[in-house]
Image: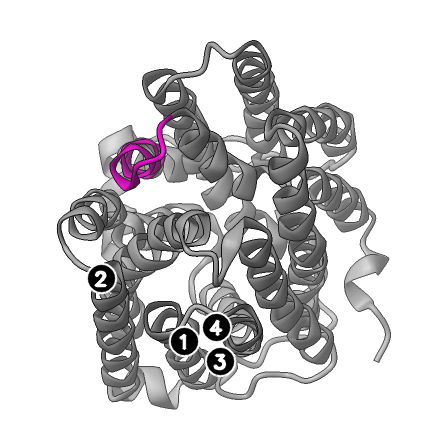
Amino acid sequence: MPLTAMRAPAFRWFFLARALQMITAAMSSVAFAFAVLSVDNAPLALSIVMTSLTASTVVFLLLGGVVADRLPRALVIQTCYVVNALTVGVTAAMLFTGTASVVSLAATAVIAGATSAFIMPSMQGIIPQLVPHDALQQANAMLSFVRSLVTIGGPVIAGLVVALSSPAWAFVIEGIGLVAAIPLLAMVRLPPPARSSTDLFTDLRVGWGEFRSRTWLWVIVVAFGLLNALEIGAWSVGGPFIAKNDPLLGVQGWGWVLGALGAGTLVTTLVLMWLPLSRPLRFGMIGMVAVALPMLLLGIHPAVIPLMVAAFVAGAGLEVFSTGWSVAMMENVPGEVLSRVSSYDMLGSYLAMPLGTMLFGWLLTAGDPATVITASGIIYAVIAVLTLCVPSVWRMGRTIRDAERGPTA
């Protein structure tokens, strides 16, 4: 089967811009956590900054979905990249000059979270505009392939950069990538969306109606509200803290673990480029059960090699769900409301994340980190299994449409 998605010129430009941005940003997500810990080596400091990021995303998500359905989605992404380039430049300057503080890093996190709230619904809604229906899974898998590829090397390099120099350099590289991606997105030319004659609140009500009418959709979103809170607390807050303070893992070891997670997703994306998911949600939620494995090991015995193996398996599971979920949304939600429905999906999924970061900041300080993270892994697995018991999640198949239909506006 050829790479059908690459036959569409608009997708080729979008893919190049997105790939460039992901490649250059590969280190900064890891370096950011250690940048905070270099200012204040405390779980609470990291949780404050992470809460600022996720809370800002939650606040602006619904507005981001409406904007992405009303305006050209490529333009929305392009504008957000301009803002992000300025933000990472300021962050790098503060780190180089030693003027960074928890408050200033939290402020830049607020801006990054706000732009994410506009980018994510736009990304979800634009893919069906760029490729024909029969190439949706392949297009999503190709983007995931690049994301996975850079995730393998990015965390490892970030660990070395943090250990040997300064996390500021990671933000310099990300800024360069954003600046270079902006003109590439300008080449993505699609018909403008139909002009809306309704107001903001009417658009939100329509999106909500589409969202709540699909049981499989809101059930998984509710589940991910809990799963994401557990993951960001135990893995994204607890992981860097244990890595910095437990010699069994270490900063560089944590980079290798995150690299293994990326390797698992990378291998799986290659498979999903050619192998259709006949039951996208069933296989996706089975994959999410595997994500509990490295969380359990992180709490029980955070040795590098076992954690890398478990992270590889979890990465594979994450990619099966990610691709399956994207395809299910794009095949079963009308394109004219897809960004709004996606914003409700993301809002529900992310709503508990600020609470998760703050709660785990307190739990990891007041209690035994190993016990907290181990318990989180057990609860995570139980929630994922229970979600599989919902009939519309277990039974959903693929829709059948005209494979020759081209991209739509």
Give the residue displayed 52% in from the left and 49% down from the top: 125
Give how far apart the Cα atoms at labels 3 and 4 are: 7 Å
| Helix, strand or loop status at disc 3 | helix
Give how far apart the Cα atoms at labels 2 and 3 are: 20 Å
Disc ID at residue 280:
3
The earlier-in-sequence mark between 1 and 4 is 1
Query: Residue 116 magenta-drawn?
Result: no
Give how far apart the Cα atoms at labels 1 and 4 are: 7 Å
Give the residue displayed 57% in from the left and 36% down from the top: 73
Give how far apart the Cα atoms at labels 2 and 4 are: 21 Å
Q: Inspect this view and state whether residue 282 appears.
A: yes
Q: Position of residue 120 (x, y in %)?
A: 48, 44
Range of the magenta residues? 40-55
Relative to residue 367, is residue 140 drawn left or right?
Answer: right
Pointer 4 residue = 321
Query: Residue 50 magenta-drawn?
Result: yes
Pointer 1 residue = 288
The local crowd at label 3, few if under 14, some if 14 to 19, many if 20 or more residues have their Cα within 10 Å, is many
| Helix, strand or loop status at disc 1 | helix
* Contact (Cβ within 8 Å) of mark 3 with mark 4: no
Q: Return the residue nearer the eye: 167 or 292.
A: 167
Give the residue displayed 35% in from the left and 49% down from the top: 237
Pointer 2 residue = 212
Q: Position of residue 165 (x, y in %)?
A: 66, 30
* Contact (Cβ within 8 Å) of mark 1 with mark 4: yes
Relative to residue 309, is residue 148 drawn left or right?
Answer: right
Q: Inspect this view and state whether residue 26 appears.
A: no
